[in-house]
Amino acid sequence: MRWRDTCGIAFAFMLCAFSNQSQAQSPYGIGRPATAAEIAGWNIDIGRDGSNLPKGDGSVSRGREVFAQQCASCHGEKGEGGLGDRLAGGQGTIRTAKPIRTVGSYWPYAPTLFDYIRRAMPQNAPQSLSDEDVYAVSAFILNLNGLVGADAILDAKSLAAVRMPNRDGFVGDARPDVK
Amino acid sequence: MSSRIDADEKSARTTRRRFLQGGTAVAGGAVLGPSAAARAEADNLPPNVPEWMKVPGDPTGGQPYGTPSPFEKGVVRNISKTLKQYISASSRTPLQELDGIITPNGLFYERHHGGVPIIDPAQHRLMLHGLVERPLIFSMDDLRRFPSESRIHFLECSGNPGYIKPYGKTASDLVGLVSCAEWTGVSLKLVLQEAGLKPEAKWVVAEGADAAALTRSIPIEKCLEDAMLVYSQNGERLRPQQGYPLRLLLPGFEGNMSVKWLRRLHVTAEPVYSREETSKYTDLLPDGTAREFSFYMEAKSIITRPSGGQRLSAPGFHEITGIAWSGHGKVARVEVSVDDGKSWQDARLQEPVLTRALTRFRLPWRWDGQSAVIQSRAVDETGYAQPTLAELLAVRGENYFYHNNAIWPWRIAADGEVTNALA
């Protein structure tokens, strides 16, 4: 009997060892490994420091063309807003009684612009623009806000280097603020 | 032969009944005339035997998926007819029409950022990657193999309502972006443990499979506390409007963070600072700074009956009832004032009082027929008391926009009409 118990325990250990080989330490062994290629295809998150920005670049002048075709019908030809949010202007209004929140006046990080345009815009066909065109539209919107020159060409490095005026405008949640 | 005749007769009567009902409700009896409609109604009142007792009713199974009585056709989501567009928009729960604490699935409030995708669950995957030992992909079948749990929690949109006029007329107009359901799914902690968190894992970035690929960063503490991956709501699979086939649920946090149509969880060392957590769901203060990562929905309550748009039929007994909730835990107490805030009395809380769930309160009341202002104030288990709008505005200013949890009073006129006392 004892021998059988010992064998049983040893067998259980062996099973564990085998399952550890195939499943590492997954408590339930549910799901399958995600490959690097699968993750690369789905992970479109861009950090505020520009991490994970793709290769390629785009110019303000190309961005002006793409914006006119893809964005202006909702956001206005110069990003003045319409069906969609206003994108340009408003700098210096955030502290006033009538703040105008735009990319230039409110957004803290430029790489977020690439992230958001690529994942969600244009609203009728998200994820349809090439990375180059997303760089270009980002460059054009930053140019509308006076944050890059008319001849600017942005890539991963130069987009991440754009310092947004409201970068230091955010604070933590201090609630409860009424007691 | 005779059964055929019965069926025809029944169908004719049903048609007449529905016609009458439509006529009185919509056209005001324009065809029949009010007296005919009133006569038909009286035919069904004592001492007469009502017509629906004299023929068999609709056949069993006539509605494979049941719908409310045709007499309740006005109880629907409250959808603004004047929005600029309806892709990124919201619709509200008709709170003043509902009882108890559970919101029917068809009336659950909606907030979408890129419309409602229709997703084949067989083609849906959840990817879990980043600072984990084993990046994993789960099918819906996989996720349903995990140990499951069901919990009742409210969900509330961060902006419910705004701070400035115009203020809504009804409870739904005002705070209809809150609903409550029994959610079933798997603890997010279990799924994260399946992949193995690395020590530097501090945030989880959740992404939806909608056209907005909506993205929010969630602190790891919340993910390990009470976050759920949800596939069912009130016993049935999620509705498309609520994230079918899979959504995140973060009890007590602002609604947009409970990412619907969840397809990806990216474990990171810091937030992703997505558009939705920088330019969008941040709270602008009068000094020009804005609060970011303001997650919790603070304690709140609203009287749903009597409430704006309703009318008290006569002086005498009326029950005051409403809902209260807190993102920080259980509702400890709801106080009600019927004298414009001069005095307050405790309302009775309906059991069960659950953590981060709607709690129904009731107060018996005798209306003397004079004009009155009634309001409710929730206190949660942390001791936090729901503030007034004036108190909130004094600290936050008019451009804060989100997280308005103000006490909201209703004015009852001498004729019984109930209106928004702050409007």
Image: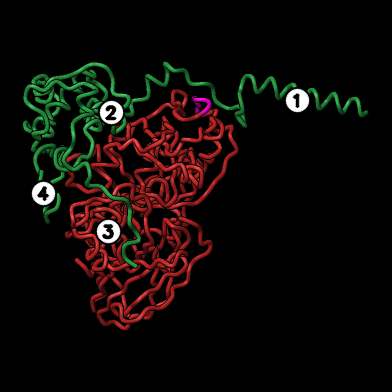
Q: Chain A in the picture: what colour?
A: green
Q: What residue type is labelled 1?
A: Phe
Task: Decide whether residue B135 is among the magenta residues.
Answer: yes
Label 2 sits on residue: A50
Q: What stretch is highlighted in magenta?
A: B133-140
- Label 1, label 4: how far apart the Cα atoms are: 67 Å
Contact (CB < 8 A) between labels 4 and 3?
Answer: no
Same chain for labels 1 and 4? Say yes or no. Answer: yes
Image height of B266 relative to A62, above or below: below
Label 1 sits on residue: A13
Image height of B390 relative to A121, above or below: below
Q: Nearer the viewer, residue B369 or B6?
A: B369
Label 3 sits on residue: B174
The chain whose colour is red is B
- Label 2, label 4: how far apart the Cα atoms are: 27 Å
Q: What residue type is labelled 2?
A: Gly
Contact (CB < 8 A) between labels 3 and 1?
Answer: no
Disc 4 element: loop
Q: What residue type is labelled 4?
A: Thr
The answer to which of marks 1 and 4 sits earlier in the sequence is 1
The location of residue A173, given as percent across then percent down, is 33, 53
- Label 2, label 3: how far apart the Cα atoms are: 40 Å
Image height of B318 relative to B167, above or below: below
Label 4 sits on residue: A93
